Each structure stands twice: as C-alpha cells, then as structure tokens.
Amino acid sequence: MRAKPRAAWGGATAGAKFYNAGMNNKLTSLIVAICALGLLAGCQSVSPAAEKKPNRFQPVIDKWVEQDAVTPPPKDAVLFIGSSSIRMWDSLHEDFPQYDVIQRGFGGSHISDSIEFADKIVTPYKPRAIVMFAGTNDIASNKSVERVFNEYKTFVKLARKGKKWGEEPVPIFFIGLTPCESRWKYWPKSSELNRLVKEYTYKHKNLYYIDTPTPILSTAPVAGGPPSKDLFRDDLLHLSPEGYALWTRVITPVLEAYCPPVKTEKTAK
C-alpha cells in the first residue's frame, strides 16, 4: 500500500504539522507492512518439516545407485516406490512372486522426494509398472491437499518422461493413503487426496487408484472410527504383517488385471 501524498493528508505546511504528517505516513506504512507479514504467516500452512531439503535422502539414493551399478536390477520389473510403508514391506518379493520387483521406499519421504530423485530411481529402470504409496508424510506436515495432488501429477509426468511416440505410458498404481489411529486427525485431508487421485485416474490412460482404505476402515471396532489396531505395528502408523497381507489381497488382482505377469527367469522357477 502506497502512502497517500501529503496534500491528501490536509496539505500541512507548518513545521510541526508537517512532522506529524510524515510520522503518520511512516506509521501507516509500518502498520501495513506488519499486517502483510501477518497475512503471509497466516497463509503459510507448511511446517518446517515439510520443507526439509530432499538431499537428506542423498546417502540412501547413492547407495541404491551403487548397488544398481554392481548388480543391475531386473528389466521389465514392477517398481514399488514411496515412503516407509514401502521400505518396511519385508515380504514384498514373497507377496508378489509372479513379478520381478524393485523396492525403493525411503522412510519419511514425500512425493516431492520421489520427484527429486526420479532420474536416479525411476526412469533408469524403465519399469513395466510403478506402484506408489506416498503422501501421508506430506499431509502430516501440513502441506495442502492441492499441493500434494499437484506433486503427484508432476511425478506422473516425470515417470513417463522420454516415452516415444506411439508407446504406451507406463502404468502407475497409486495405493490409497492409509487411515490409521496415530494420524486420525489427518484422515479427512488424506481422504480428500485419495478422492482427487481417484478422479484423476479416470481421466488419464494407464493410471490406477487402488482402494485399500475401504477394507482397512471396515475393520474399525467402532463405526466411523479408526481401523483395527491389529493391522498396525505398536506405533499405530506402520502396517503389521496382517496389514501387509490385506494390502496384498487388494493390490494383487488390480495389478494383475492391468499389468499381467510375464514369464521371466525368476517367475519361471
């Protein structure tokens, strides 16, 4: 806001009046500046945790790159990527024996981190399909639903970068954000993100939403409340073996329907 010209303040010409008018102008400017800062602070909905630099995961990424150089990952594999629920899925390879699987989960990560390192742990693999679970940490860090949704769309574009004309876009399966007791207060926002992603998949080829939240919520001891604790570890955040078994039962038919298994050296055994 620009200070009004002195004439608009009464056209004072006497020394004392001029001094007061000048002070009023400065005071008005100061108040406007303070108010503007207050508005900006009010609009800032992302906590410092949400703005951590993605290079905090650099050591993990570097280790994977080194491993890939020594032992190249399988071709035409299904890439599972995302946050700790992917990282802690100890039975992943056993749960999907019909596929060659690449597991790239890094705990605490946001979708933006998968974007940051897509050129290291996504596109080089040229996967047959991508299964993503990410977004819960984003929401818990107070990122807006719209921002997280836009970052998912950015990831989709990056994952499909380099596709040649006429090639089918790589299928991407988004596992719905999990309702859990420890982050129950965030469930309305997580549910909204799930809805946006689901609607987005309807409009774009080879995008799929996997509805794991519905069967998880069906285990709730109290209607409308958080799901059964049996599906989670002691932290009531990360899945237990029972939780992963439920995931596997829901994910498998969707993945097989749109990315049928093919015989490879592994799956032929």
Image (cartoon, grey):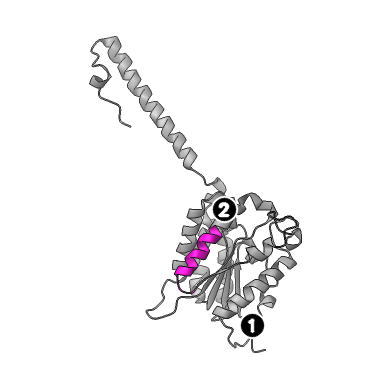
Q: Amino acid at mark 1?
A: Gln
In the image, is residue 227 part of the stretch drawn in magenta?
no
* Label 2: how many Cα within 10 Å (few below 14, some 14–19, many 20+): many
Residue 204 x %, y %: 45, 70
In the image, is residue 197 part of the stretch drawn in magenta?
yes
Judge whether 191 appears above or below 6 on screen.
below
Q: Which residue is mark 1?
A: 98
The magenta stretch spans which residues? 193-206
| Residue found at the very far front of the displayed protein | 223
Residue 229 x %, y %: 75, 58
Q: Which residue is mark 2?
A: 189
Spatial CA span between label 1 and label 2: 35 Å
Question: Residue at 65% of width from left, 58% of height from top?
Answer: 179
Q: Are marks 1 and 2 in contact (CB under 8 Å)?
A: no
Question: Residue at 55% of width from left, 46% of height from top?
Answer: 47
Q: Quadrant location of residue 90?
A: bottom right
Quadrant showing the N terminus: top left
- Of 115 and 179, nearer the camera is 179
Which secondary structure lies at badge 2? helix
Q: Is residue 157 left or right of residue 56?
A: left
Quadrant showing the C terminus: bottom right
- Number of numbered tags placed on the structure image: 2
* Label 1: how many Cα within 10 Å (few below 14, some 14–19, many 20+): some
